[in-house]
Image (tube, rainbow, N blue to C red):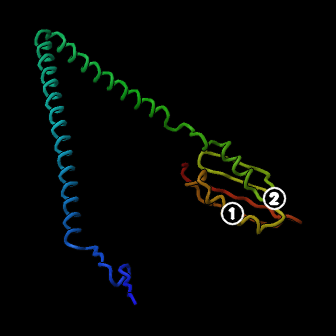
Amino acid sequence: MPQQINLYRPVLLATHRHFSARTIAQSLALVVAGTLAACAWVSFQRAALDRELQATSRQHAAERQSLQKAIAANPAAALQTTSLEQSLQALKRQVGERERLLAELMRGRIVDGRSHSARLRLVARTVPASAWLDEIALHDETLSLSGRTLDPAALKPWIAGLSDEPLLAGQALTTLKVEQAGEHWRFVLVRSGARP
C-alpha cells in the first residue's frame, strides 16, 4: 500500500524568520539610501540659497554705491534731509507742548461716567423699595441722602452696596442717622471724602 506524505504541513515547512541577517541588511540599506537622498536634497537647497544670497548681496552693494554717488553728486539733498529732520524735531516739540497744554486744560473736568447725573442714577437704581428719598445733595466731595423707610433693616445692605460702587470710591460713610418718626423711620446718610 502506497504511503503519502503531506509536505504542506506546518511542521514540515521551513520557518520564516522576521529578523534574519538578510532582512536586517536590507532595512539598513534602505535607511542609508533614504538618509543619503535627504542629505543630497538639503545640500542642493543650501547651494541654491547661497547663490541667491550672493546675488542679493551684490545687488545691495550696487544700490549702495549708486546711492553714495548720488549723495556725493548732490550735497544739497543731504542738507535738505538734515533741515527736514530738524523741522520734524521742532514739530514733535510743538505737539508735546500742545499735549501738555491739553492735559492741563482737561484737569478737573468731569470724566464721562463720573458726573453728578451718573451718581443720581446710581442712587435711583439702588434705593430699596421700602424707602423713599426726601432730599439728595451732591457737592464735589459729599453725597448727602435723607429720606424715610418702612423697614430700617433694608438700609443696611443698601449702604453696604453703595460702599462697593466704583463710582463712589474714595468716599467714606461719615454720618448715618436712623430715628423713628411715627409709622416710618427717618434716615440721613452722608458720604464724603476725596473725589475719584
- Disc number lying in front (1 or 2): 2
Exactly how many numbered labels are in the figure? 2
Residue 138: mark: none
* Residue at position x 89%, y 66% in the image: 183
Q: Looking at the rendering, which quadrant does residue 102 occupy?
A: top left
Find residue 90 and report its horizontal and vertical position in percent.
Answer: 29, 22
Give the quadrant of the N terminus.
bottom left
In this view, the residue in front, 11 or 172, is 11
Three-letter code for the amino acid on which mark 1 is drawn: Leu
Residue located at (29% from left, 78% from top): 14
Secondary structure of the residue carrying numbered label 1: strand
- Which residue is outermost to the right? 183
Q: CA distance from mark 1 to mark 2?
A: 19 Å
- Picture layout, residue 7 above or below residue 175: below
The residue that mark 2 highlights is 129
Residue 176's label in the rendered image is 1
